[in-house]
Amino acid sequence: MTHNEPERVMELVHKIGDNARETITNLSDIVWSINPANDKGEVVFSRMESFASFLLSSKNIQLNFNCDEALRKMEFSMETRQHLFLIFKEAINNAAKYSNAKQVNVAVSLWNGKIKMSIADNGVGFTVPKWSENGKSNGSIHNGGNGLSNIRLRTDQLKGNLDIRSSAEGTTLELVLPLT
């Protein structure tokens, strides 16, 4: 860098700041997920709702969050709550950044002895990538991000099922995970 490029220097400073904030957030998520005090469903689902409410309200997107009381009373393993929260977080981030939605509906329920989570928005939709045998997409959306691939990987690690449907009327992500 030379002194004659103040715009470039500021761009790099902002990028460093963004990366530092993202790293701190990721570390906070890891610390939260390994703390045994957070095993209870009430804690897990309250954190999910709080995260979504804060992020979506900053984009003027209405959140409807519904969770079965039975799930709120259950306890979850560290792996399950970590992956469930990070899948949720990625889906909410995608809706906030790319959907142009006015509303996001989240439903978490017990379904045939499994956790079923549905996240639906009324946004603009996107082309859902095709997945190969190794879980890689045929190309990513949103400027080369890894979000959908990470969701797929986390779902596979929990031996769950993932269905993503998207059209010009919005996107729905449905996740079904075994209870562990």
Image (cartoon, rainbow, N blue to C red):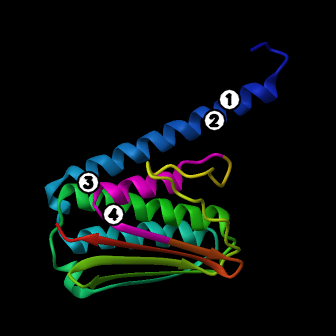
Residue projecting furthest to the front: 133
Location of residue 45 in the rendering, given as x and y in whole percent from the top left corner: 31, 73
Query: Which residue bears the numbered disc 3?
Result: 33
Q: Given the image, on which type of amino acid does mark 1 rest? A: Leu
* Mark pair 3, 4: CA separation: 10 Å
Tags 1 and 2 touching, CB below 8 Å: yes
Residue projecting furthest to the right: 4
Q: Nearer the viewer, mark 3 or mark 1?
A: 3
Of 166 and 76, which appears nearest the observer?
A: 166
Query: Which residue bears the numbered disc 4?
Result: 84
Task: Let me know if residue 161 is in the magenta part.
Answer: yes
10 displayed left or right of 166: right
* Mark pair 2, 3: CA separation: 27 Å
61 displayed left or right of 155: right
* Mark pair 1, 4: CA separation: 33 Å
Query: Which residue bears the numbered disc 1?
Result: 12
* Residue shown at the point (34%, 78%) measured from the top left: 116
**N-terminal of the two: label 3 or label 4?**
3
Query: Which residue bears the numbered disc 2?
Result: 15
* Mark pair 2, 4: CA separation: 28 Å
**N-terminal of the two: label 1 or label 4?**
1
